[in-house]
Amino acid sequence: MIEFLLKKRRVILFIVLPALALGIFSINVLPVKLYPNMRKPRINVHIPHSGLTAEDFFNDYSDIIEERLNSIQDIDLIESEYENNSSRIRVEFDWKVDSEEAKARVLSEMNSIKSNLPEESEDFSVNYWRGQSGFLSIAVTSESIDSYELYQILESSLKPKFTSVKDAEEVDIFDVDDITAEIRLKPEAILNYGLTIDTVANVIRNGYKNISVGYFDNNIEHINVRIKRDIDNIFNIEKIIVDTIGNKIIYLKDIANVNIKHALPRRVYRANGKRSVLIFATPKEDGNIKKMSEEIAKIIKETKNELPADIDFNFIIDPAKFINNAITNVVRSGLTGAFLAILVVLIMLGEVKNTIIISISLPTSIILSFILMNIFKVSLNLISLGGIALAVGMIIDASIVVIENIHRHRLEAVEKHKKLNFIHVIIASVNEVRNAVIASTLTTVCVFFPISYTSPLTNAILGDIARSVIFTLMCSLFVALIVIPVIAFYLFRKDHNAGKNGYKINKLQQTSINITEKFKNGYIAVLKKLLYSKKLSLIFIISSFTFLLLLIIFVLPMIKKEIIAQPISSSIAISFTHFGSVDKEEMMNNIEPVEKEIVAKYKNKIINIFTTLFRENSGNIVVTFKNSFGINKILDEMKMKYTSNPEWRFDVFPWDPSSLPLPRTDDLHIKVYGPDKKQIVALMEEIVDLINKEKIFRNVHSEPTTKTQDEIILVPRFETIAQFNDYPLTKLTSLTGIALNGRKVIEMKQDNKELDIYMMYEEDLINKSEDIENFLIPFNDKAIPLKHFFDIKKQKSIPEIRSDNGEETYNVYGSMMRADSKSKRAFYEEEVKNLLKEKLKVPDGYFVQFQDTQLIINESVKSLLIALIASIVLIYIVLGIQFNSIKIPLIILVTIPLGFIGVIISLFVFNSTVSLNSLLGTILLGGIVVNNAIIIIDFYLKEYKKTINKTELILRVARLRVLPISITTTTTILGMMPIAIAIGDGANILQPLGISVSCGLAISTFFTLFMIPCIMNFVDLTPQHHKDDL
Amino acid sequence: MAKKCVLIFNLLFLMNFIYSQNEVFVKTGTIKYSDIYDSSYYGGRIEPLNTIVQYSSISGIINNIYVVEGQRVVKGTHICSIRRKLSSESYQPAVVTAVSSGLVVNMKIFNQMEVFEKSELFSIADDRKYKVDILISDKDILNVKLYDECYIKDFLSENESKEMDKENHNKKENEIKGKVNKIAILPGDNKGLFNAEIVFDKTNDLFIGKFVTLELRTNKRNAIAVPQGSILKKYGKLFIYIVQSDNTIKLREVKIGQNFGESVEILSGVKENEIYIIQPSAGMIEGDKVNIKKQ
């Protein structure tokens, strides 16, 4: 193969160059997201059923709905929350189902049962969670233009252009002005004129529109006839004529307060201390969020010239920035790692041309890997990009081994004055290491395969890292065995053909030869002592494993555990409530000094400060700093400064819009089972009270809530109602409904805004059950109370019913105290168990069961450990096949536990955590560390001659392989150094991985270089073909 | 030594501060007996208590009208004169005088109008007292007795009531009180509604024709009542938090009676003068120490 390629070497150009072009093309078409999917597709169904209690709706409709939803394919869980007036159902699908597809399935089933639901439930909504897609938000401000005008400018100049952004699901410009309209009826006035509210509602509905009364044809055209009502503007609705009594015309304003005014919208935004207009965009599910953000930014840039000069666009949340940061991190890690690795190659091999070849192999492998990512539909996201950054140090390993061997053979040929064809020299060099390189790359790739079969969460988080590493390594293997020999041929052909005359050792080479020789001599001297004293060897082997055991027993439990490290944010959020503010205008004035104070204090460090007012007296401020350096100090300062007092309530916390969307886990979860609901609720109440009393967990609560709700039942007195021709039951129902909650009477359009106008009574008309009983109905110029038509009963109802897959559930949840470490969770749970055992009397037939809250984490860790074992087995099989031996793979595998020594020490020393990433690092380490042993043993078997003393042969092989092993190990460690040090925002996600691999590898290599020769010395490693000869 | 003392003092201060931070501020009430009653609301228009219709005693032509409709007159005031149609001219026109003091209403005559004997001329509304006719539901009728108190709801305009609140925090004193004057024994029209008449003294706030909402207070008695919000439902039973002398709270099981507006009658479980928590918070636990909010 190699021979063919070298003879037809131009073929390589025709393969590699188009492949590189395809790789570059793939980068542009790959979907770009913030994160891979880390949560199962979850569809939320919201069903309004105003007027129906949780119990009524549950009894009458839950079966129809849940049975139908249960028939959908690939459903994992249906969680239902039935509440008074509305219910929510969460349908969780299997990981493999696409969110849009899941939504379509649920929508279709819900539509099929629409006619079986009560009328008010037909407006149900079906949505899915979009958290991991990310979003873009831009705050627009201006010094000279007020926010109302600014909104109009942006709406007319930018909104039409935003429709061209293909990757966006929607781009919104949030209005800064809202029109509020309400009709508050005056009860006395209504009674005075003997009107009923539903007649008023009808009059309003029909009173403001022009009425079409018909048409005629005048032989030329068709002419419509309409009656004009003059009320075509929302501000005129108070002039609607409600009734005429004698000569007196009664207008709407006579019987109601009609309040129509411009007001602040539901949410008010302020950027850098000024009112701002917000541009908000979300991407399509399979869209490129980076492209979306960039296109929007481009549109803004292009349009800016047409806009007034002082309009400022502040990118508050810019996903393109996060992804660019990640790419910068990858490039920086890659360049730093590559630079360090190449430097090592230059020092060790002392030749610039070798270094050039290695430099070419790195970007080539990465670019080619994008083709595989495209084929296997791996998106570009912060995790997969991290995987590529991680692989930088490993990518060049195969190339180094190949180039080092070519280099060595070339030198040998020159030194020994052999007149060999250069193609043969290269073929011999490549063939010599080919199997070892393939085996070592395959072992690394092997370790990642089991990850695809880990728990779904682990696969979701680590899958993209694993896949990107596998792809880059496979490409690096292709480059090392196919591309590198050809480039080497071109670069060294002239030198080789010139023989010794053409090859002069330069100063750099001489220096590197001197360094490497000293290094080799030192290593061999120590190894010689070990090998020639079997006692010393044995002590070394036993003490190493004892040390590992001690680390596992004593140090490992002391290391913190978490699912995955979260990135350190460069933003701080302050949520606030000002108890004195009664409207948003006042709130804006009150929050302004706080904004100014923050800006004044951190002027040079802040990029922007963005405030959102949610309600008339609360909101939050997000302060974005230039970087996360010193952010903890600022956080502490702010916490000290902004403490709650009778006037304000503050909560200061780090805020990160690009945080990993991990599934939430509870610290305490207890389920109560039993035959009677009332008894279960009483038990739950007692459990909550007992735990709260002992203050073991915080925020202890039950789901469903144990608080019952009062309910008033109006039982119609049909005999009485029958005597009132003006008041049939339907009319009484409608009157009561309006009296309680009002009713939408018209929809109007004003300034291009759709407005729903509600008619209702004064706010305090009905505050207690007595008020409903005494709600007055006009009759014969008098008024009689509603209770004349109804018997009124009061009862308690359960406001909430919860069910999982159709089974009603009763749960108690709790969270750990903020100051407590998560590692004490099990201890506190045990305390609760003892407490309940001691103080809770559980009646016969009832059960209190503690749920495994750490299930998802434990499953992940467990599945990763299984993956680790599976990867070891896979490595064993690959090596068994490679060496055609049962014994040799076992010797090689000894290096894996030795790697754990490095992992445990480094995680402990650098205060890092046992997380999915550090576990992945350990698995990855297993794949890398065996490579060194493979190279030594492979060479030993190749060099084996019966005549040579075994120890001497081991020493010779060790001397030969120590250099490439040192170079590849150093390059891998240096390549990962930027990740281990965590340079750049968000880089700390992968830090545990970088630390565990780099430090583990350093220590493991040290052990490999001494341990493997020691073990080889003890074991009979006669190659199979020599044995066969015997 | 001094340094140590300062340190200990500071430590004690800090402990006291932390301890006092843990105490919860609560609003409390005292258990006491009070007058409680049921309220029922009805609506009707203000009318004069008596309206006397005056008829013509002779047949003739209205010769002169001395008053205008709505004019206040006293008993004996000349209202109009009637000239006999068929008699000789020597007869002076007959003068019709007001039989009672009050307002002249329902004028049915004009100059030169022909009237006949016993035809209705006008009415005198005796507005020294007002009445409101209402229709009482059969559900309330057994609880309503003659001379029961009755109040006009929200008779003050919004501004007036605000001013009143500032000046005098007790708005009740300004209520217009009336009483049940008549109750029909039989309901009318098979609708289960009984006619009743409520009488009020004349005040400046009322005028004839005004539509008013009336509050009938019935079923009066003296009992212990607490706000409904102070009653907790726990473990399937009803409780109230009682503040003990050491400011710790204790759950006391209670039995409740009827609801009265926002209050509920307590039948058993508490004693007079005990202190209870008006709105217990969700996180409150028996044994917690509380700080009573000054009101």
Image (tube, coloured by chain):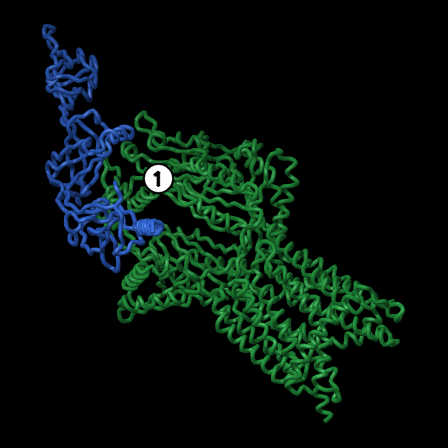
Chain colours: A green, B blue
Tell me the amino acid under the disc marked 1.
Met
Tell me where residue A925 appears, x and y as whole percent.
61, 70
Number of numbered tags placed on the structure image: 1
Tell me the subunit letter for badge 1.
A
Left or right, A38 with reference to A650: right
Q: Quadrant of the C terminus of chain B?
A: top left
Query: Residue tagged by mark 1?
Result: A760
Q: Nearer the viewer, residue A473 or A516?
A: A516
Secondary structure of the residue carrying tag 1 is: strand
Q: For residue B220, what is the image quadrant?
A: top left
Of all residues, the one furthest to the bottom in this rendering is: A1030
Residue A618 coordinates in the image, percent (x, y): 42, 43
Q: Whole-percent x and y of residue A481?
A: 75, 71
Pinpoint residue A542: horizontal percent, then vertical percent.
56, 80
A869 or A368: nearer the viewer: A869
Where is residue A962, by image quadrant?
A: bottom right
Above or below for B123 versus B92: below
Q: Is residue A912 above or below residue B81?
A: below
Depth check, front residue: A706 or B195: A706
Q: Is residue A657 above or below residue B184?
A: below
